[in-house]
Image (cartoon, helix red, strand yellow):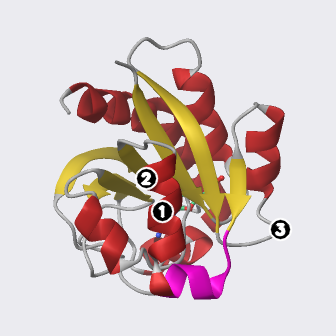
Amino acid sequence: MKKKVAILASGNGTNAENIIRYFSGSETACVNLLIANRKDAYALERAKRLGVPSVYMGKDEWKEGANVLGLLRREGVDFVVLAGFLARVPQAVIDAFPRRIVNIHPALLPKFGGKGMYGSHVHEAVLAAGEKESGITIHYINEHYDEGDIVAQFRCEVLPGDTPDELASRVHALEYKHFPEVIERLVTAL
Ligand code: GAR
C-alpha cells in the first residue's frame, strides 16, 4: 500500500512543493496533508494549488497536540516530514510516530543547530564562523531542537565572498535534490 506522508511547514514551502511534486505519480508514497503553523505560510497556497489538503493550526493546538495528532491519525498518515517548520512538535506526536518524523536542517549538524537557528540565521552563522563547507542534515526529531539521530548529510562548498543568500541557494539546491530521495528510502523501509 502507498504510504501517506504529511508535511509540516511554516513559511515559503519550496521544499514542500518539491516533495509533493516528487511523489505525485509515485507508487511508493503520496503527500496527503500539509499542516502549517502560520496562517500566512505560502506553503498552504502551494499545497492548495497542487491539490493537497492543507490546514492551518494555531499556537494553542501545537502546544497541547491533541488536534494535530487527531488529524494525522484521521488522515492515516504513516510518516511526517518537517520542511521549514519552525515550531515545536508536540510530544504526543513525537511519541506516536517513533522514527517516523524527519526534519531538514540547512547546515551540517551538530554545528549551527538549536533554538533560533533557522533559515538565513544559519547561513549567516556559517559565514561568520569562516566555515569552508556547509550543507544539509536530515534527521529524526526528538524533544530537543536539531538533536535527533542523523539520517543523512550532504555537503557543499562555502565560497570566498559568499553572501547568506548565495550560500542559501547552494544549500537549497542540495535540499531539492536529496530530501525527497531520502524520504522515499525511509518510507520504503517502513
Ligand atoms: C529550508 O532551507 C530548511 O532547511 C530550513 O528552512 C528553509 C525552508 O525553506 N529549515 C530550518 O532552518 C529548520 N531549522 P522552504 O520553506 O522554501 O522549504
**Alpha carbon separation for disc pair 2 and 1:** 5 Å
Q: Quadrant of residue 166?
A: bottom right
According to the picture, the residue beneath numbered tag 1 turns out to be 70
Quarter of the picture for ligand 1?
bottom right
Q: Using residue 38 as the reference point, say whether residue 31 is left or right of it.
A: left
According to the picture, the residue beneath numbered tag 2 turns out to be 73
- Residue 159, given in percent of the width and then of the height, sits at 49, 54
Q: Identify the residue shown where x is 38% and y is 18%.
A: 28
Q: Identify the residue shown where x is 32% and y is 34%.
A: 182
Q: Is residue 130 visible?
A: yes
Magenta span of residues: 57-63
Whether 128 is drawn above or below 159: the answer is below
Q: Identify the residue shown where x is 27% and y is 80%.
A: 143
Whether 128 is drawn above or below 4: the answer is below
Q: Amino acid at mark 2?
A: Arg
Which secondary structure, mark 3?
loop
Q: Amino acid at mark 3?
A: Asp
Q: Is residue 58 magenta?
A: yes
